[in-house]
């Protein structure tokens, strides 16, 4: 991209893009906190990672207006690493993730991503939805009657808000109303501060000392690779959607490099990696954003919010965050599933189901994509399958 083209991407209505950026930041807040619990890290780290990633990508990203942050897919990959080796392992894996994404971009990885069959992509999205859904049931079921009531109220507010209010994101409305409700009535439910203490401090660049441990290094390198694969698949799918919505084109390999730089910065400041988000990217366009200013404002606002709203985060009911993520999980399921299987029930259905089964059994999103894609081309070669 020429310097002139890059400068043009910063032009637009400053007021409109600033407003869109603030609204987008508010839309990202619930996910930033909720995905942190999936990954097994402190929610302030989720907010820090989201703010830093948006800030850096407003400068380095190729696909303007696209929104990236710690996502459901990456968070699910991070979770077992955080549980077994702690935050330092997650930070180191994020650094490796960034380096791998930059390398993939330089080596034109998106030429290879085009080879991933549609059935594998559909299976990937559906398995992601199931994993996300099931991961949140523990925050609602078997706790107390008050938890069920709060969860039902949250679902109702999200549904009602989505129907009638377009400016403020429905999940944020639910969080605000039910956090105030719970603070006043103090029902028998779990809150964020029951699961994680909220610590807010200025971050500074550092590299984990554990990088000197060879075994630790290899484990984090493996997870960094898995995180990079999942992130690139999710980001590429989102970039294609954004190309269609905005009627423009983007360089997916340059985007991979930009995302890698962002994840490197996030890792250096103690955060964890992310990828593009479909719903929030579409929301950014819907709100009227048309320049890089919107995502710059989003990142800046989130980082400031970390210090302004940090103490309030601890009082958010866990059941409300669970309903937010369950709502996201339901929107993750690929609507092409039934029509795709109907076209060729045996081949397409087997591909989708096998991808889902492998991911759900292994609890590894990247592994299912890689294995089924390889199997697809082996079978295609030997029994001359028509690629659909």
Image (cartoon, rainbow, N blue to C red):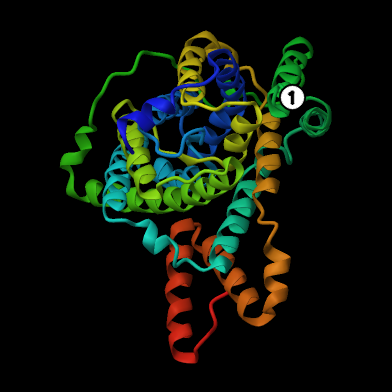
Please indicate, yes or no, whether residue 364 appears anywhere in the rendered image: no
Residue 290 figure quarter: top right
Q: Nearer the viewer, residue 299 or 128?
A: 299
Residue 114 figure quarter: bottom left
Image coords of residue 101 (percent x, y)? 32, 47
Left or right of 125? Residue 377 is left
Task: Check the image and report above or below for 131 versus 387.
Answer: above
Task: State which quarter of the image contains the C terminus.
Answer: bottom right
Residue 313 figure quarter: top right
Q: Residue at x 58, y 42 (%)?
A: 278
Please indicate, yes or no, whether residue 39 appears anywhere in the rendered image: yes
Q: Nearer the viewer, residue 10 or 59?
A: 10
Image coords of residue 13 (percent x, y)? 55, 17
Left or right of 152? Residue 24 is left
Image coords of residue 208 (percent x, y)? 24, 33
Q: Which residue is mark 1?
A: 174
Image coords of residue 86 (percent x, y)? 37, 37
Under tag 1, what secondary structure? helix
Q: Residue at x 53, y 50 (%)?
A: 240
Q: Residue at x 64, y 23 (%)?
A: 191
């Amino acid at each position: 991209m020429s310097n002139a083209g890059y400068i043009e991407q910063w032009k637009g209505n400053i007021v409109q893009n600033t407003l869109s950026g603030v609204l987008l930041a508010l839309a990202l807040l619930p996910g930033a906190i909720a995905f942190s619990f999936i990954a097994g890290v402190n929610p302030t780290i989720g907010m820090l990672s989201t703010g830093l990633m948006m800030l850096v990508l407003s400068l380095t990203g190729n696909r303007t207006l696209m929104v990236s942050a710690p996502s459901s897919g990456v968070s699910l990959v991070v979770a077992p690493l955080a549980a077994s080796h702690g935050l330092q392992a997650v930070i180191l894996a994020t650094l490796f993730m960034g380096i791998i994404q930059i390398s993939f971009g330089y080596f034109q990885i998106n030429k290879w991503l085009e080879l991933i069959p549609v059935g594998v992509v559909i299976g990937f999205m559906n398995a992601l939805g199931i994993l996300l859904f099931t991961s949140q049931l523990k925050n609602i079921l078997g706790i107390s009657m008050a938890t069920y009531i709060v969860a039902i109220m949250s679902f109702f507010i999200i549904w009602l808000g989505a129907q009638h209010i377009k400016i403020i994101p429905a999940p944020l409305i639910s969080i605000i109303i039910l956090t105030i409700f719970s603070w006043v009535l103090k029902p028998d439910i779990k809150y964020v501060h029951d699961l994680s203490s909220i610590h807010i401090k200025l971050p500074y660049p550092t590299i984990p000392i554990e990088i000197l441990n060879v075994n630790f290094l290899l484990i984090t390198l493996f997870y960094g690779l898995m995180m990079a694969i999942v992130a690139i698949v999710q980001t590429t799918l989102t970039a294609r959607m954004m190309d269609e919505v905005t009627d423009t084109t983007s360089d997916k390999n340059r985007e991979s490099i930009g995302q890698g730089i962002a994840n490197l910065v996030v890792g250096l400041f103690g955060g964890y990696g992310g990828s593009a988000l479909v719903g929030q990217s579409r929301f950014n366009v819907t709100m009227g954003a048309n320049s890089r200013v919107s995502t710059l404002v989003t990142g800046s606002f989130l980082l400031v919010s970390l210090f302004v709203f940090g103490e309030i985060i601890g009082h958010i009911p866990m059941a409300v965050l669970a309903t937010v993520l369950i709502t996201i999980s339901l929107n993750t399921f690929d609507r092409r599933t039934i029509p795709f299987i109907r076209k060729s029930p045996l081949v397409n259905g087997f591909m989708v189901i096998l991808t889902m089964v492998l991911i759900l059994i292994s609890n590894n999103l990247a592994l299912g994509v890689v294995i089924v894609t390889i199997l697809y081309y082996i079978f295609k070669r030997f029994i001359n399958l028509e690629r659909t």
